[in-house]
Image (spheres, rainbow, N blue to C red):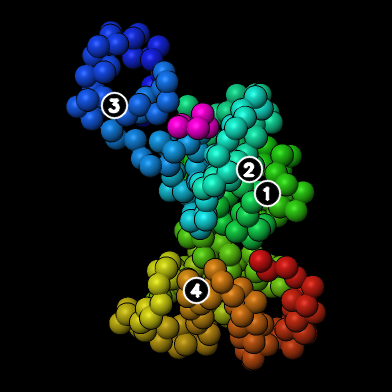
Amino acid sequence: MEVWTRGDLLSQGLTDRRIAAAIDRGILIRLRPGLFATSAADEQTIAAAGIGARVACVSALRSREIWVQEPARLHVEVGRSASRLPAAGFHVHWRRNPSPDPGGDRVRTGVTAALIQASGCLSPIMWIAAVDSALHQGAISSGDLAALAARASPRSRRFVPLVDRRAESGLESIVRVVARELGFHVRSQVRIDGVGRVDLVVERWIAVETDGAAFHGVSLSARDRLRDARLAARGMTALRPGYSLVVFDRRAVAEQLIGAVGAHRRVNDAGHLAARARRRLARLDLS
């Protein structure tokens, strides 16, 4: 445990004098009267506990290494009776449901509760990427999807059927959902003879590989070039939308998919599929 009350410490056999000595030695940090953190506690935990809150929503997901972008502010959860919270630096979620929070503890919400909170803070596409990540890592089970479908925000819950535990990165999840929203047939984690496993195959002939590097200027490795050459030899088009494109310009990713499908001579009814996808794109919110 990273955060302790005075009662916790006394029950462990410490005295007030020993608590004070531990503070002097840097073993414990006094957060507020009667509440302490160990020196191993991270900055977010200390900041949340210091105002009587716990890490929540996207911040809780990131702390559990579930795929989600770094939020601009720390997301925290507080009880209904909390007051006089500092506004700067925090995005506050008020605890609405008094029922138990599976997997939650004193310092942060459980994964299911955090995903429900995040459904109101993330766009549906980014939210599905987080749900995929949680499923893939085993942080939630298929049974937890019912709770998400019932309690997630209305704009996100319709996307729950698009969840896929096979997704190995948030980028893969985002591109998959974009392709599905365009009306394309998509398969995930497809093994291709002579190539290996590819992230996505769209309309049988478009292979999509996503790169998780969150920086610009990533060049193709010799292995990537060999894979692309082998895909081309099989008559497949290889697409590699990078991190910046997928995260910050999903409309460009959609247009890339439409162009690749429409131009591929082996895609059945390619012109019709591309035209339908363009009509859908005009109506889609890809935020």
Instruction: Decide if residue 150 is on the left or right side of residue 187.
Output: right
Q: Earlier in the sequence, mark 1 or mark 4?
A: 1
- The image quarter containing residue 29 is top left
The structure residue drawn at horizontal position 22% and vertical position 25%, both measured from the top left corner, is: 24
Please give the count of numbered marks on the rendered protein.
4
Q: Residue 169's x, y, as percent? A: 48, 60
Please tell me whether mark 3 sits on a helix, a strand or a loop.
strand
Q: CA distance from mark 1 to mark 2?
A: 6 Å
Q: Earlier in the sequence, mark 3 or mark 1?
A: 3
| Numbered label attached to residue 230 | none
Residue bearing the label numbered 2: 117
Q: Earlier in the sequence, mark 3 or mark 4?
A: 3
User: Which image quarter is the C terminus in?
Assistant: bottom right
The answer to the question of whether label 1 and label 2 lie on touching residues, with beta carbons closer than 8 A, is yes
Q: Residue 274's x, y, as percent? A: 73, 84
The structure residue drawn at horizontal position 46% and vertical position 48%, both measured from the top left corner, is: 62
- Pointer 3 local density, CA inside 10 Å: few below 14, some 14–19, many at least 20: many
Residue bearing the label numbered 1: 120
Residue bearing the label numbered 4: 244
User: Is residue 244 among what the camera can see?
Assistant: yes
Instruction: Decide if residue 116 is on the left or right side of residue 216.
Output: right
- Pointer 2 local density, CA inside 10 Å: few below 14, some 14–19, many at least 20: many
Please tell me whether mark 1 sits on a helix, a strand or a loop.
loop
Secondary structure that dominates the magenta span: loop
Task: Point out the stretch of residues depicted in magenta.
Answer: 49-53
Residue bearing the label numbered 3: 28
Q: Earlier in the sequence, mark 2 or mark 4?
A: 2
Q: CA distance from mark 1 to mark 4?
A: 23 Å
- Pointer 4 local density, CA inside 10 Å: few below 14, some 14–19, many at least 20: some
Q: CA distance from mark 3 to mark 4?
A: 41 Å
